[in-house]
Image (tube, helix red, strand yellow):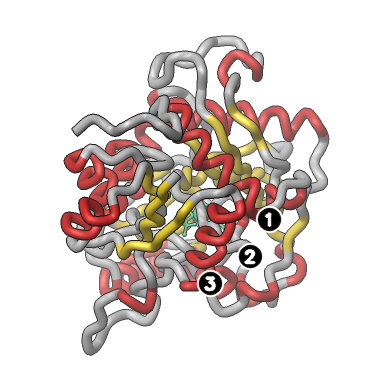
Amino acid sequence: MRVAVLANLQKNAPTWPGMPADRWDDLDSEETIQAIIDALASGGHEATFLEGDLTLFETLPKLKPDICFNICEGHWGDSREAQVPAILEMLRVPYTASGPLTLALALDKPMTKRVLWYHSLPTPVFQTFERAHEPLDPDMAFPLFVKPSREGTGMGVTADSIVHNEAQLRAQLHRQFEIYDQPILVEHFIEGREVTVGMVGNLTTPVARRLPDDREARRISRGLHFFPPLEVDMSRYPAEEGGIYTSRIKTELVHTFHYLCPAPLPEETVQALNWLAAATFRVTGCFDVGRIDFRLDAHDNNKPYILEINPLPGLNPGYSDLPLEAQADGWSFEQLIIRILEEAIERYDLEESDPRPA
Ligand SMILES: Nc1ncnc2c1ncn2[C@@H]1O[C@H](COP(=O)(O)OP(=O)(O)O)[C@@H](O)[C@H]1O
Ligand SMILES: [Mg+2]
């Protein structure tokens, strides 16, 4: 098939004087794009990179792809990850991964947590702040964790995000409001192991309904393939990182990523994580691929808490979590990329020879 690989390259992103150093940390490198193009080519597809911005209105009708492999994070706006899928729907071009609603939702961590809360899925107790002086809700006991609502790749996440008292909380809120022009999310700090679960596939049962009461894994996860959980090996990082998966670990130190995959966890914990991952994939309406970040509460028998869902997980073949999980499962990077594409092809019911409706 003719595939357009749509992404926002770090090197194409706008710059301006005084721009925060981490502004485009979540955008992609040429290395990642080339690896995806090569993977698609190895599956017999003809792949071309297009920058995911307004030029798509011209470049897509010219290229006439059968489908797009979309990993655009976007540049501007509260729903920036949703913009390219919305453009693709206007142009009636099929694409991989989730749609605008899910991508806008998942980019907004508090909004996602409200959906999880509605479904009684475990996510840390939280409060959002629009000003640094708002009073703290009575159920918000220290220690707390402070992070921007709508960023990724650890942006705004440092050891100082863990706050133990009012003074530290207010100082951290002030600091984050200075850099990030958005509500700041404050959550219970979950001390414990850091695990992420990736998956590919699509649910075959109706999504966005109430979850079944029983915890039978197969009932809600039919159609999904779970990769083994990956644990970030915090013991191998300097104490200054505070035992959390900081912005520094995700950028500066990314080429020496210390992880355990499969994470050394009892089978029943893996099953519980997979159930929660499937439930999150389902209630947020994901397609084709996703990765859920968890923390296991060391003070409560390793009880898992959902931190966030990544419906566009990083795809660098060398260091992103999802490709490393796939590798631990015996999959090559090529197999992972082609599986994501095939999930979308099946979902749209596309056949190699099918003409697209005009
Ligand atoms: N409530 C929390 N308790 C403990 N650690 C947290 C909490 N929220 C975030 N973290 C730490 O910060 C990291 C990044 O947070 P996350 O919500 O996953 O955002 P990002 O989009 O930057 O990955 C997590 O992987 C974890 O190490
Ligand atoms: Mg995360």
* Disc on the earlier residue, 3 or 1: 3
Cβ atoms at labels 1 and 2 below 8 Å apart: yes
* Separation of marks 3 and 1 at Cα, in angstroms: 16 Å
Q: Residue at x 40, y 67 (%)?
A: 27
Tell me if 75 is positioned left or right of 72 in this view: left
Q: Which residue has dot 1 on it?
A: 324
Answer few, some or many: residues within 10 Å of disc 2's Cα (few below 14, many 20 plus, some between 14 and 19): some
Tell me if 210 is positioned left or right of 176 in this view: right
* Separation of marks 1 and 2 at Cα, in angstroms: 7 Å
Q: What amino acid type should be assigned to the residue bearing mark 2?
A: Tyr
Q: Residue at x 52, y 11 (%)?
A: 212
Q: Nearer the viewer, mark 3 or mark 2?
A: 3
Q: Which residue has dot 3 on it?
A: 31
Tell me where residue 142 appears, x and y as whole percent: 49, 53
In the image, 67 versus 336, the foreground residue is 67
* Whether residue 71 is situated above or below residue 76 in the rendered picture: above
Answer few, some or many: residues within 10 Å of disc 1's Cα (few below 14, many 20 plus, some between 14 and 19): many
Q: Which residue has dot 2 on it?
A: 319
Q: Residue at x 49, y 14 (%)?
A: 205
* Disc on the earlier residue, 3 or 2: 3
- Quadrant where the image shows the C terminus: top left
- Quadrant where the image shows the N terminus: top left
Q: Which secondary structure, mark 1?
A: helix
